[in-house]
Amino acid sequence: MPQATRFVSPPSPEAQPFWEGCKRHELLVPRCLGCGAFRFFPRPMCPRCLVTQLEWVKASGKGSLYSYVISHSPSPGSDEPPTVIAVVELEEGMRLMALLRGVTADLGVLTIGMALEVVFEDADSEVTLLAFRPASAR
Ligand SMILES: [Zn+2]
């Protein structure tokens, strides 16, 4: 079977520091210098106070499972295991979507609110993606 071509869109200017942090295996989130609120997803202006200045701070990388969906391969007869796509609520309060590693796509294993921690996966020399795993999986 031919390998699928992977397309990587360039990050927006607002999200560039986030992806650079991922390359260093750091989870960086923008915080508004006007009101102190986290501004995630990254965007040019704070939706609360309209200030454009921000700083990037390192998040703990800890969070909890807010929601998820189990994705099965669309290829008939595929032996590829299903993946879990999670919405993770970080300790800092914002939510982001990522793959959930270290679990089977089993409804008995996945519990809303379960403790998670970030892991970084170097897809290649240019791109590092983040995922999460159960916090006790060290
Ligand atoms: Zn603000």
Image (cartoon, rainbow, N blue to C red):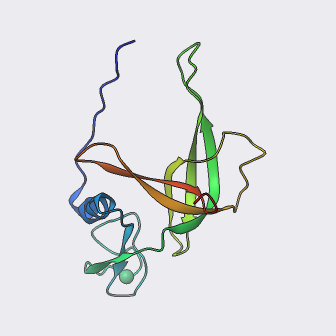
Is 49 located above or below residue 131 in the figure? Answer: below
How far across and how far down the image is residue 82, in percent?
A: 60, 32
Q: Is residue 84 above or below residue 74?
A: below
On the image, the x and y values in percent for residue 101 come to 55, 47
Callout count:
0
Residue found at x 57% / y 65%:
89
In the image, farthest residue toward the front: 138
Point out the image quarter for the C terminus: bottom right
Q: Residue at x 39, y 63 (%)?
A: 41
- In the displayed structure, 127 sits above or below 21; it is above
- Classify residue 6 by image quadrant: top left
Dividing the image into four quarters, tell me where ligand 1 lies. Answer: bottom left
Residue at 42 percent of width and 79 percent of height: 48
Q: Is residue 110 left or right of residue 138?
A: right
Q: Nearer the viewer, residue 14 or 25?
A: 25
Query: For this rendering, which residue is in front, 2 or 85?
Result: 2
Q: Quadrant of the N terminus?
A: top left
Residue occupying the point 30% across, 72% down: 45
Q: Is residue 25 left or right of residue 97?
A: left
Could you say where residue 103 lies in the image, as x and y percent from the top left? 64, 46
Q: Farthest right residue?
A: 108
Residue 62 position within the rendered picture, expressed as x and y whole percent measured from the top left: 54, 69
Compare residues 115 and 39 and report the one nearer the observer. Answer: 115
Q: Is residue 82 left or right of residue 9?
A: right
